[in-house]
Image (spheres, coloured by chain):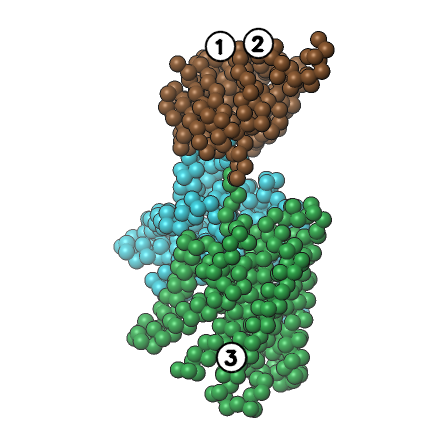
Amino acid sequence: MNILEVQSLVAGYGAQDVLFDVSISIKPGEIVSVIGPNGAGKSTLLKVIAGIIKPRCGEILFRGESLLNTHPWDITSRGVSWVPQDDKVFPTMTIKENLEMGAFLVCGDISRQIEEVCVIFPQLKDRMKQLAGSLSGGQRQMLAIARALMTRPDLLLLDEPTAGLAPNLVYMMLNQIREITARMNSAVLVVTQSLDAVKLSDKGYLLSAGLIKFEEKTDSFLANPDVRELYFGGQVSTET
Amino acid sequence: MTDLLISGIIYGSIITIGAIGLTLMTDILGFFNFAYGDFFTLGAFGTLAFLAIFPDLGTFTGLSFGWTMIFAVILSALATVAVMLLFDFLFFRRLRNMGVTSLFMSLASLGVSFILRAIIYIVWGPKVQYYSREIQLSRDLGLGISMKVDELFILICVLFLVAMVFYFLKYTKIGKSLRAVSDNKMLAQASGMRPSRVIMWTWIICGLLAGVGGTLYGIQVQLNPSMGWNFMITLFVAVIMGGIGSFWGAMIAGMTIGIAGEMVTGLLQNLATAMQLQANISVYKPAIAFIFVIVILLLKPQGLFGKPKFNLKQ
Amino acid sequence: MVNYFFSYLVMAGLYGIMALALNMQWGYTGLMNFGIGAFYMLGAYSSAILTSSPSADYIGGFGLPVLIGIAGAAVIAGLIAYLLAFPALKLRGGPFAIALLAIQETLFLLVKNESWLTNGVTGIRGIPRPFIDFFSPQNYVYFYAVVSIGVMVLVYFAIERAVNSPWGRVLRGIREDETLTVMSGKDCTAFMRQSFVFSSIIMGVAGALYVHYTGFVSPQVFSPLMSTFLVWFMVTVGGTGNNRGVILGAFLVWAVWIGSDFISDMVPASMATQIGFIRMLFVGLILTITILTRPQGLLTKKLSVIKLFMEKEEY
């Protein structure tokens, strides 16, 4: 049983279609990555799943129920959390308040959830009173993911979690993402341009110009000529 | 000199009450609501109506009103909220669903403002009215400060309300969600906040502030159906000067405009009298605020404490 | 009755001129000017002071010919608009509206209180009415209706010509997307200033025409409601960005406004004061209902004005 099923999705902005016929599926607890060049429609795909953009046609099934015509806040309450690529925190609020806003739909005491995310992201623990707007890029990314985890989602949507991070931070971030699935048993859908992010996932999709070009388990995905063409410029693969 | 300062503080504190509500509303609803001043008027006249309904329970010592007034203010504030929500239901909600631009929302709010003012005129008539006809004398409070007890009450009331709004925004879940929406609308929705709920709470807070603020303004001056409309420009000036969406900005700008308006006109008037010039400068009190806002905007386009997203210069 | 109709035509024509000028700013340039009454008032008072007979109460009464008065009105309104444009055009949208509203209120206060210049609330009398000698006072309204409508038609053609020129295309570009227009190398503020000054001159002329019709001017007629917001209602109801539409709007809204005079004749005197407020309610309702049902107004020009009404699709 797949936790998320996206079937032949078409979506776009205004008169312009960005996604044509995209289908992906995710099993519970799985990390799935979608890679593709700039403008391939990766962020759009996540926004459609999160309910920010209405698709033109296609179907999105979450635990077997359709997410079409559902408002973003209802999608969140069903257990899908989205971390946007830009503007991912509330800048004039403290880290603690950001986490509280993440748990907006949770009634009652949330100190347990805060402790839980602090185990995954210990960097946040000592800075609870700091304004989110004053954090560095890496800390901001951690806070954004921590905020999304406050509702203990079944599916976490991450938009370029490693973009703009220093190489050592990229590895730390990827380890933390793996830890999320281990601890909370959430499925994670990562859209990214980084092949490192693909290495940690169970399955990879290649999205190019709004179409899914290729779908495979990670090992064979990385060996695929299309992927190599995209990321190593083709010459490398022909010479070797 | 101290007299001018005190009356400036009173005037400024009433501006503050209005400006805090207006800044919140402009920020979260995303348009300039030209009907806000008339909700202020509605609050003042609502209190007048409830005062007439209730039996007179006597007055507090030193004040020109008593328990009846307190009950009337509370009911009037609630009534203002109800009317605001009704107008939101009838007009603004539909316009939001249509996806009309913020400029057209402002224009629609202008229409709402005329509807509301016309209703107030029709119900209460164009005459100037008072809550109490008693003339109060100022009392000496020591240290060279003398003020009416009513004015002291207004100050305490404003301090209390400002503290309440601050507590609400800083420590309650709903208050924090309002700040979250002002920070990042899309992320707020993705965190589970319903825009309709947030907007409803914004109207509630602004309605309560308008109801009480209008009454305080009525106590300090007098009631007439155009009072709120005329006051609105000053409120907007405070909002723009403080920076849209900034609680502290609205407060500081409100107090500055109040005190500077009284001081500048008062001192110029004294000067004119001393020079034996026939001039009535106090009528230009609102103009002082306008000069302020132009200067501020030329120096700092997003206002004193505004977020960069509200750079008015673009 | 016929007389009444023609006096309606005079005022509707004057409001039509105002509406055309506002449409130039709002419909074509996207400037939310809530202070248009200020320029109407400036024109009215300039012409009144220049042409009225000398008086001891206030400066002026220069007794100059009417045409010089009208020219003076145009110059003063244009000059003040030009000077105000520098600080005001640093703002856009709502703040611009507030600033202009504040400027109007300030000028209104000045006119009301500085009686050495304007004779205060008493107003200025004895403003010459052109060619009055050729008509009996009762028939003068027929002549003036022709003048007012004639000037309106002239203004209509002038503005149509202007907005369909390359210059007007830049204005529409500013309204649709200012950043893009700046990027394509146009000095947006300069174009906005030109549009602002040009339409302010037209408003000033409208004000001058008004005082030469009544022969009397006092601050009351320039209250924000009568001089600014009524015109806004006309433009919105008629069709923002459509010159024929705003003229239709001017005639319609003014008919509603004037028509309530008939009602007040029919009801008992005790209710007569309420009628003024009922028509305020009326125009408020007309405005909101127009925006709710036909945001583009009665007459629409498709595609040319979309951006002003509807938000871009959310990203």
Task: Give the quarter of the figure containing the N terminus of chain A.
Answer: top left
Q: Are marks 1 and 2 on the same chain?
A: yes
Residue at the image position 54 percent from the left and 49 percent from the top:
C307
Which residue does the numbered mark 2 point to in the structure image? A220
Q: Chain of mark 3?
A: C
Label 2, residues with CA under 10 Å away: few <14, some 14-19, many ≥20: few
Q: Amino acid at mark 2?
A: Ser
Q: Which residue is mark 1?
A: A182
Give how far across and how far down residue C296 sits, in percent.
48, 55
Where does residue B110 sit, x and y in percent of width and height? Answer: 46, 56
Instruction: Residue C201: tell me if it is visible.
Output: yes
Q: Is residue B196 above or below residue A231?
A: below
Helix, strand or loop at disc 3? Answer: helix
A203 and C54: which is toward the camera:
A203
In the structure shown, which secondary structural element does the residue marked by tag 2 occupy? helix
Tag nearer the camera, 1 or 2: 2
Q: CA distance from mark 3 to mark 1?
A: 84 Å
- Colour representing chain C: green
- Rendered hue of chain B is cyan
Q: Are marks 3 and 1 in contact (CB under 8 Å)?
A: no
Front residue of this view, candidates A227 and C173: A227
Q: Gap between marks 3 and 2, in whole Å? A: 86 Å
**Is C131 displayed left or right of B218 in the figure?**
right
Q: Quadrant of residue B196?
A: top left
Q: Secondary structure at mark 1?
A: helix
Q: At 53% from the left edge and 16% from the top edge, which residue is drawn?
A: A215
Give the side of residue A101 with respect to residue C127, left or right. Answer: left
> Which residue, given by chain and number where applicable, does mark 3 sit on?
C145
Is the residue at mark 3 from the same chain as the one at mark 2? no
Q: Which chain is brown?
A: A
